[in-house]
Amino acid sequence: MHVEKQRPAGSALMHFLYLIFIDPFVQMAQAPDLLAQTLWEGLVSGMLYALIALGFVLIFKASGVFNFAQGIMVVFAALTLVGLYEAGVPAFLALALAIVVMFILAFVVERSVLRPLVGQPDIILFMATFGITYFLIGFGEIVFGGDPKVMITAPLYLPKGAITYHTLGGMVQLQKIDIAAAVIASLMVAGLAIFFSRTRIGRALRAVADSHEAALSVGISLEQIWVIVWFAAGLVALVTGIFWGARSDVSFALEVIALKALPVLILGGFTSIPGAIVGGLIIGLGEKIVEFYWGPLVGGGTDAWFAYVIALLFLLFRPQGLFGERIIERI
Amino acid sequence: MRAPGGPDARIGDVLLSVENVSLSFGGVKAISDVSLDIRKGEIRAIIGPNGAGKTSMLNVINGFYTPQRGRITFRGQTRSKMRPHEAAEGGIARTFQNVALFRGMSALDNIMAGRTLKMHKNLFWQLLRWGPAMAEEVAHRREVEEIIDFLKIQDIRRVPVGRLPYGLQKRVELGRALAMEPDLLLLDEPMAGMNLEEKEDMSRYILDANEHFGTTIALIEHDMGVVMDLSDRVVVLDHGIKIADGTPAEVKNDQAVIDAYLGVAH
Amino acid sequence: MLYRETGQFKTTYQSDSAIFPILQDRIGLAVILAVAFIAIPATRNDFIINAVMTPFLIFALASIGLNILTGYTGLLSLGTGAFMGVGAYACYKLTTIFPQVNILVWVVASGFFSAAVGVLFGLPSLRIKGFYLAIATLAAQFFLEWCFIRVPWLYNYNVSGAIEVPQRELFGIIVTGPRATSETRYYIVLTLVVVLTWLASNLVHGRIGRMWMAVRDMDLAAELMGIRLLPTKLLAFAVSSFYCGVAGALMVFLWYGGAEASVFGINQSFTILFMVIIGGLGSMIGSFMGAALIFILPILLRFVPESLGLPLQSATVEQLSFMIVGAMIIVILIVEPAGLARLWQITKQKLRVWPFPY
């Protein structure tokens, strides 16, 4: 009698545990092609998070500024490119002009935001980048209009279509543009690594990252360095914007997605380029897998918060991130 | 050098003792196996060249650093480490080498903040700021005004401390520490960066605090003249090791101390 | 000339510790209150009352909430919108489950729900600060926003996914729902905002306010003075979220009349944060100034060019206000990081010694 009564509750719990802990893995094993597809999608979006995070890291390393506007710079760069093309500028000229615009942006930011605020607490500079964010949103929409735009790919000779593999008992589709993005992103990261380690400016950048005062005292111009890193971050933003725009529309709605680079930084650390990449891939993979296999249990949409909750857990239990060193506070 | 003849009536039993304390950061040893005691009512100086581990010792005493080895006995209670709030609740107050005031608050609020532990009216009364909460606020304000008078900073009460000159900031910081009515006051280079006149003023305040309020004081100072004049006993650290301990006169003539300061090869 | 304190001697510490020690300030406050309580409702202008004053007061309340956390305690939060949402949804659930209870009780009670959620998400603040904490509060923002959409129980399984404010009466007068008059709603909002502002102002001027500011300015020194960091920070999270929660409940129940999750999105968080930065971090009066400036800016952009014969499209108005607010943030941080409140203080100081320079 007693046992009879408890059974339904017990089996409901068992079923629930089954849904959480066993069923997703059964699904993975039964349809490996879907798993492979999900992993690929995760890697691709992770790469884009990593690219945004890379922009953050460049600026943070060289100026100690936590640039909240990096995500908006991605959208702004892509919007400039598409906007110019739609206004009748040839594709590669539009690309060149977009690069020039990113340089002007770097220059203006240095002159009107960084220079007047030099020496202020980090948090003030952080808040100033909120101002940059909002200014760029308003400015971009006034100049290029608020409607979502379609990224130009064919005129830039970027590949279209997909490669389909019939394998794993089904099929896996890889978009060619994603492969192109992966190749170009890798080249860019390699280029940056060489730039930092082999060139005079790169070494100066690292000196500035270690100590502003020390860099000044050996004759490195902070103003120039800042323009250079903001410009580099702008270039990274442009590349990110092109590939991201190719996957969805180009509009400031991307801003919310771009914010996911912030949890990536918590995982990877604020100063490490490899950290940004690894963190981006982990977040990208994690949120796609969780959404695909566990999302339906809670009604879906988990990718809206998954990255942040992971970051929150890191902040609670390992605030220094995956690779970071513990900072000893001294007084 | 005070009280040249015989033991001083001010000085009582051991208030705090540190035994065989070692502290290191990563591979760097900041303090190795140092023992020292502080007696009730005395002014105890900790001196030594830069990097000798003086500030680290104060940080161990008030619980900011946790030593790897050793024991701390405070008011008869022995423990392996102090926690910051235990130190504060036990009556240890502190000033800092680089002034650590609450820069956005007025001098008055800074010193009032020193009374935090002594104020108890709960959130409900705080929300009303009336009745018991107001009575408490006024009572503590009266105490704080006495400290303000004592330190002669009446005219800067309402000024945010971030805008005060350095010398005055140091004075406000002393006031904030005194507001805690501490039994033991740790002063980390209270006269660093001061001119002669300011140093004399600060010495006066330290002596007065010691005499009038009976506060035990441990201070780090580089100005040897000040140390010799103010302190009852001096402990000398060098590279994290205690090399001498005694009255100012004893320490001044100690060969190890002279070597440490003049840089004789070990 | 009129603004002089000469001759006003304080004979007790109590009068010197008053929040408005100068007579003229007290008179000014009384005039403002009189205008708010008598003159504005007397205009019987629905636009002013319902579209300007009521939302302004609600935003000011939310700004006070965020200011307690960010301005006084130095903990940057990007989750304000979500905490407001918790208040709104809690109030909605409470009043639909217990319809007979006075709605104002639920508006205030919803603040406690928000406070509890705020404390939960404030736990990481023990170990992290600055932009790390800002990112942690983003977790609150996105997770709670997701709950508002994906947990249908919160909006009583409405097909629209939105909450609709039911009609509630207070002493026989309709106070919520479409049939409530603007004046009634305005009076309720005004009264609550005045009382809550008074309480917050008391709090920040006393022991607890000093503890918060001590943690903000130099947390290590605060700790070595016996201020326990975690309880102090969590109390700031609780009080701050309480204010935001009440503001959220007021926003839906006495202004919008209904809302969906997007009202409590990240942009709401930013709007409130900008009000606090522009108005003045760590200032009560600044919360009002910031709320007024940012809320009224789009209204001005809409009506001023229109009256000059150059009507702007509503999209352009929005874009322009984004640009202006963005630029204003930067300018304020450069010129006077303490915001409009500090400029106001400087003006008062100048008035006090006028016509002499100092």
Image (cartoon, coloured by chain):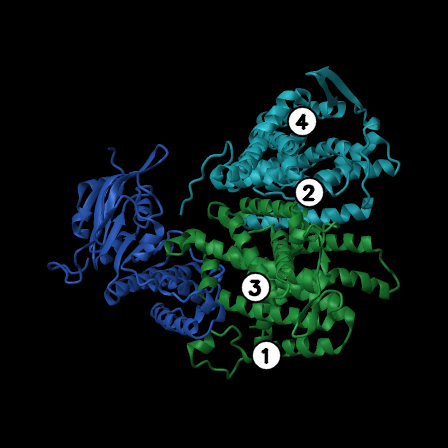
Q: Nearer the viewer, mark 2 or mark 1?
A: 2
Q: Give the CA distance from mark 4 to mark 1.
A: 70 Å
Labels 3 and 1 positioned on one and the same chain: yes
| C84 left or right of B50 in image | right
Q: Amino acid at mark 2?
A: Val
Q: Pointer 2: residues within 10 angstroms few (<14), some, or many (20+)?
A: some
- Residue position for label 1: C3
Chain drawn cyan in the picture: A
Q: Residue B29 or B266: which is nearer the viewer?
A: B29
Q: Give the CA distance from mark 2 to mark 3.
A: 30 Å
- Residue under mark 1: which chain is it in? C
| C337 left or right of C301 in image | left
Q: Amino acid at mark 1?
A: Tyr
Labels 2 and 1 positioned on one and the same chain: no
Chain drawn green in the picture: C
Q: Residue at x 38, y 65 (%)?
A: B120
Residue A219 visible in the snapshot: no
Label 3 or label 1, whichever comes before in sequence order: 1
Q: Quadrant of residue B261?
A: top left
